[in-house]
Amino acid sequence: MESTHIEPGFDQAAERELDAVFTGSGAEYFRIWIVNLSLTVLTLGIYSAWAKVRRLQYFDRNTVLDGASFDFHGKPWAVLRGRLLAVGLALGYHYGFGFSANTGLAIIVALLLALPLLLRGALRFRLSNTSYRGLHLGFSGTARQAYLAYLPMILLFTLPTLLQGIGAPLAVVGLAGLLWVSWPACHGLFKCYQHQHIQYGNLDSRTGATATEFFGPYMKASLVGVLGAFALAAIGGIAAAAIGGEAATYLPIMAGLATAYVAYLASGPFLQASITNLMWNQTDFQGVRFESTMAPWPYIRLQAKNAILTLLTLGLYRPFAAVATYRYRLAHMAVLAIVPAGTVVAATATGASAAGDGAADLLDFDISW
Amino acid sequence: MIDALYYDGLSATAHPVTLTFSPQSLTLNHGGALRSIPRAQLALGEPFARAGLALALPGGGRIEVHSGREELLALLNYRPGRIERLQAHWPGAFAGMLAMLCALWFGYHHGIPAATEHLAEAMPVDVELSIGAAAETALTDKGLLVPSRLSDERLAELQALFKRLQPAAPRLPLRLVVSSAPAIRANAFALPNGTIVLADELVRLAMGADNQWDREAERMVAGVLAHEIAHVEQRHNVRVLARSSLLLGGSWALFGDFSAVAAGLPALVAQMSYSRDMETEADAYAVALLRKNGYSAGDLADLFELLDQYVRSKGLNAEDELPRWMRDSLSYLGSHPAMDERVSTLRDMQDEEDPVE
């Protein structure tokens, strides 16, 4: 596969930040969203594939980088196929053990075998159907790498159910539960896989991040969650003592619920911001690098505002929230390029797929939501 | 003449071009070089309010127009589709929302119950038998179906009562199992294969402090058994399965875009409310069975009151310590309707019965 190398003659000082703008608006997206949601409901979910294509086109085409916008070319039928497949898999997983231990086991094994491929397929679908300046993106991760990247996560999710289904003693199931401490690394594994194989034209991405770097953000995020929980519990306890009487009995319950929710609301965005920065600051194409400057606390405030308004409006604020979040993320992602646009050319396609893995591709299924 | 940027699909360079239109074609002027493309071969991406217009050219090129949008749309004789027109105006959007809310309401109140019924009807009896058998095995393995410790005499009376209560031609062969497992406490439940499990504790509760199998105890246990028979006859387990699948699939398809929390919630709440309807339905069927055997709706009500007292005495139910507004919302959210409601419904039914004695 061809790739450009940066010639020593390139002037480092010539690196420039590409201007990024989002031209969409919450109001406009709300109208699109509500009409598409209505059609989805009226068609019992079938239209959701067209709705998804429209949503991706809306966000891609309203993202203007260096004066040019992105675009999404995926076909709704491909999305529909993927969704039907995803539903089938989910039902199989949900009800497999209800029939017999053997059926349940068979389904889990099938999932273990198929899921990494399907997840890779979803990545390939999303990226290869996205274009910028007339050149398509792509994903060059191989199937083998997909297994190495995704299996740990899948095993982590399915092992407890699997063990319970075959009737393993509770102690063993409990031990399997302990494996969850390795989740940050599992998360890191597949994120690194994703960032290591992005293609744009003849450029390939590469990341210096490693899976174990994910433990840091996770620990900090847990701390944020725990501290938030303690703070709220303390406030709840003091308030209950102050008000006294009947309120004292059910205020702790309400405080408990609120605490759990706030912990989720604070540590979630904190983690997202940290991981985005972690990954993108260490990802680059030849001649293009990124600076992700998402600040955890402003992002937490944004997501908290989104969550509260969404709840208060019974969900109607959701499209506004989506636009606000996207705008924030775009504003905090700097793309810095040394190479002029002209040096990026279309990837030399070798046969059926530019990924070079040779194996005949099933029509790529998009099982992501 | 419109200014645009042209991308040839071979490199990422933006080429400034000007566009001119004729009735049949578009002419691209790229620094003097002209290229003519028939209109029919142009593909315009859905125009969004402030996004650049994107024209796909045959052979893999692309034109982006960021200023002069309106002019371009006019020149292309662009006519927005129906959906785009709905999206463009607030009345259209709200009309869509209204249609959706009606559809959801209709689906919830008519669509899902109807579909659940069809699914449940279509489910062959064999499936019920095997699911029930699997459940029974699982319960036995978990130590929840331990043989009863009541006397043989008592057990014989219970079996006789059960036999009397059964409808003449039950849908499935019904079987009564009395279990002494403490984990069940004072409870009774029905499995899809027709096995009805009755806990020793419940029988003892009905017999009261004097531990007498008197007419009163018999009536209350009859109420419970009738209620459980109702669950089997009305295929409630199967309907719950069908219902939860439909709701899970439905809320996932519609709201799966929400966070995982939100996606689970609608289904959960709706599910709970259906279970409440089913319990009410079972109560009604049970009353019919009871009356046929000379008992009354009051017997079931008596049992529920007894159960409620029992549960409170054991400190198992914190509901009555909560203010009424919270209790009410909890009862809507809980999988069993508040005992008060069911008891008062049954008392109403008792009042309808002829005061024979």
Image (cartoon, coloured by chain):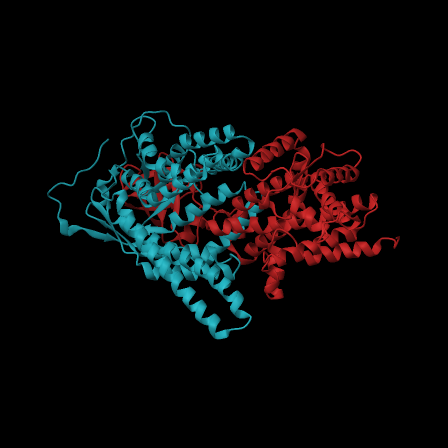
Chain colours: A cyan, B red
In this rendering, does residue B338 appear at all?
Answer: no
Q: Residue at x 44, y 29 (%)?
A: A110
Q: Is residue A247 above or below residue A193?
A: below
Q: Residue at x 14, y 49 (%)?
A: A12
Residue B249, quarter of picture: top right
In this rendering, does residue B133 appear at all?
Answer: yes
Q: Is residue A131 above or below residue B216?
A: above
Give coordinates of residue A22: x percent, y percent: 36, 55
Q: Is residue B162 left or right of residue A217?
A: right
Q: Is residue B39 left or right of residue A245?
A: left
Q: Is residue A156 above or below residue A281?
A: above
> Of all residues shown, which one is farthest toward the bottom?
A242
> Of all residues shown, which one is farthest toward the left?
A9
Give coordinates of residue A315: x percent, y percent: 51, 56
Q: Is residue A135 left or right of residue B212?
A: left
Give coordinates of residue B310: x percent, y percent: 65, 55
Pick whichever, B35 or A39, lies toward us: A39
Q: Is residue B328 above or below residue A343?
A: below
Give coordinates of residue B35: x percent, y percent: 33, 38
Residue B7, quarter of picture: top left
Residue A137, quarter of picture: top left
Q: Is residue A209 left or right of residue B294?
A: left
Pick whichever, B182 or A312, lies toward us: B182
Count of all numbered marks drawn on residues in the image: 0
